[in-house]
Image (cartoon, rainbow, N blue to C red):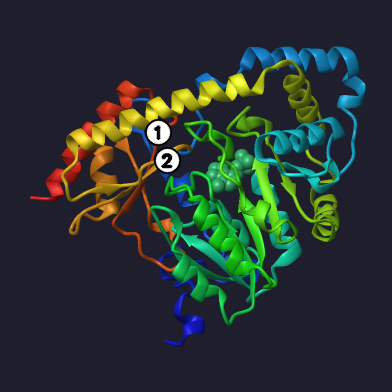
Amino acid sequence: MDKKTKNVRNMTHWPIKTPTVFARRMLATPKSFIREILKVTENPEIISFAGGLPNPGLIDVKGLAQAAADVFASDGRTALQYSTIEGYLPLRRFIADRYKKRLGLAISPDEILITNGSQQCLDLIGKVLIDPGDRIIIERPGYLGAIQVFSLYEPVFVPVNLNAGGMDTAAFESAVSGYDTKLFYGIPNSQNPSGITYSVACRKICAEILKGTNTIIVEDDAYGELHFSGKSLPPIKKYLPDQTILTGSFSKIIAPGMRLGWVCAPRQIMDQLIIAKQASDLHSNYLSQRIASRYLEEADLDVHIGKIRAAYHEQAHAMIDAMQDNLPASVSWSQPEGGMFVWVTLPVGCPAVDVFTEALKKQVAVLPGLPFYVDGGGTDTLRLNFSNATPARITEGVERLSKVIQSFNR
Ligand code: PMP
């Protein structure tokens, strides 16, 4: 196999669809494996580590209800009217100010487009930048939602392994050099699915490797505010501002149901994203934007995020402690510094899909890692979510899971 085809996605593990009336792009797009699994785990008796939901107890329902009431009372007719494509200016100003304060990034509100969740950023980026056959470098394992949405634009995925400090930079360099790569898509903070955070050195090296190339960096920062220590690491955009598209989301810090995210892009790319956004949905839910903006005027976001970080830290601790106490030495896992996930590597002879099936019989749901690999592999990995169960349920769930893993290990 030559170098060019070596990393190309092997599609055989994806659900194969019969070519019918559907567009070719749909044949290459996997259906959401997670959605299928979540159907199985809806039973409240089941301790679920399979999903990726934020903790509902940390949504400030009262504060949001007050903000909504204020918006309806003071400006209801405008808030329920059509609005601008770019999004509500005070909300874009809030995002720009927070980048300045938190990360020292100078981003003007004009470089920010409000989207329908940050998932929509990926779709717009795909529409604007990806032609069939374009190369996309993606983390291995990679975010399933990105794999799914980029697949619609028929790229060639080039996966690069992650290690404890982020990208395997040697492998990254060889994936970049000598090729024309359209995008590098990565999640430097609390990556989904692995929970890994890139070190500062790794961020700098990735930027250095891409400097002077035509490759555009898509830096997905859905979890950037969820670092347990509250310490923010410099985004790759800081090192290569003109080459980097940065995406963000209110889903994990306010509420996912509001479907609000944003994309910051250099001017020329932004102009195209705005055209694609207009063609797609005219603008993001304006009422939602107004409520979020009002909420942010009243609430102390730092205090609110502080509560989320403390709770997730405790939940992550409960999971890691229970794993240390119960799992055999042949099992390894990532050490999350933030976010919502732990990544587990199982011992030889312990297939993740079988662990999933057996664990479900014991009322515990886990997510096999397979769908996060664009080239197959990962059959011995699991993603465990800790944000949506109490510490006591987490401990109980890991104890049950451990018995299942040990039963394979005899
Ligand atoms: N990026 C990553 C890495 C995610 O994990 C998610 C949600 N699971 C998203 C983007 C999309 O989130 P949203 O559309 O709610 O902002």
Q: Residues within 10 Å of mark 1 (few under 14, many from 20)?
A: many
Q: Which mark is residue 234?
A: none
Amino acid type of disc 1? Phe
The image quadrant of residue 399 is top left
The image quadrant of residue 74 is top right
Q: Quadrant of the N terminus?
A: bottom left
Above/below status of 255 relative to 333: above
Give the mark nearest the N terminus, 1 or 2. Answer: 2
The image quadrant of residue 136 is bottom right
Counting from the top left corner in percent of width and height, residue 291 is at: 76, 23
Residue at left offset 81%, top offset 34%: 93
Above/below status of 73 relative to 28: above
Q: Residues within 10 Å of mark 2 (few under 14, many from 20)?
A: many
Q: Nearer the viewer, residue 287 or 381?
A: 381
Counting from the top left corner in percent of width and height, residue 287 is at: 80, 28
Amino acid type of disc 2? Phe
Q: Nearer the viewer, residue 90 or 357?
A: 90
Count of marks overlaid on the render: 2
Q: Is residue 350 left or right of residue 133?
A: left
Residue at left offset 48%, top offset 47%: 192
Above/below status of 175 relative to 188: below
Q: Which residue is mark 2?
A: 341
Q: Are marks 1 and 2 in contact (CB under 8 Å)?
A: yes
Alpha carbons under labels 1 and 2: distance apart: 6 Å
Residue 244 visible in the shown view: yes
Residue 151 visible in the shown view: no
Counting from the top left corner in percent of width and height, residue 10 is at: 44, 73
Counting from the top left corner in percent of width and height, residue 251 is at: 61, 34
Residue at left offset 53%, top offset 45%: 189
